[in-house]
Image (tube, rainbow, N blue to C red):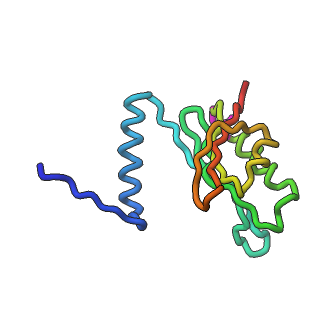
Amino acid sequence: MSEPLIIVTDAPDAADLAAVREQLSRFNFSATGIDDQRALALLVKDPKTGTVLGGLTGRTSRGVLFVDMFFLAETLRGTGLGSKLLRMAEEEGVRRGCHHGVLYTNTFQAPSFYKKHGWREFGEIPSDPSGTSRLFFMKELVS
């Protein structure tokens, strides 16, 4: 067999991404016997236009809720909606059998928000621009 071709891209084909995910899923299943990864999205939409105003996206897998992205339009912040979305995601994670949650945020985003909701910081990686960091949080969802 000749040496494999390696392609670096910032625009991967959806089918190629699906192929990598499928191969990893098969490997993980062979190692654990568990095949329960599911996407999770809580979308906030304008009731008149259907325009997405924000939301929370992530996934659940093998007992862990992963929060990948969380954003609310500025006009919706401070209304309690963010707290509601995070609580709903945690509750859905528990319904799916998750015991823990994990996420990261940036120092200029919302670390105090997550701390207020019981998430505990467990790691920090300096990032750009200088003086900022990515902060990693976890939370025990069921005791």
Residue 2 shown in magenta: no
At x 62% / y 43%, what residue is drawn? 124
Is 58 displayed left or right of 139 in the figure? Answer: left
Q: Position of residue 67 (x, y in %)?
A: 63, 47
Asked if residue 11 is positioned above or below residue 89 in the image, the reply reads below
Asked if residue 134 is positioned above or below residue 128 in the image, the reply reads above
Return the residue nearer the eye: 48 or 80.
80
At x 63% / y 32%, what residue is drawn? 97
Instruction: Using the rendered view, name the quadrant where residue 70 is placed.
Output: bottom right
Q: Position of residue 46 (x, y in %)?
A: 77, 69
Asked if residue 64 is positioned above or below residue 128 in the image, the reply reads above
At x 60% / y 43%, what residue is drawn? 66
Span highlighted in magenta in the image? 93-97
Q: Residue furthest right?
A: 79
Asked if residue 12 is positioned above or below residue 112 in the image, the reply reads below
Q: Position of residue 15 (x, y in %)?
A: 38, 60
Instruction: Using the rendered view, name the quadrant where residue 101 is placed.
Output: top right
Q: Residue furthest left?
A: 1
Return the residue nearer the eye: 1 or 93.
1
Q: Residue furthest top?
A: 143
Return the residue nearer the eye: 131 or 89.
131
Is 7 displayed left or right of 112 in the figure? Answer: left
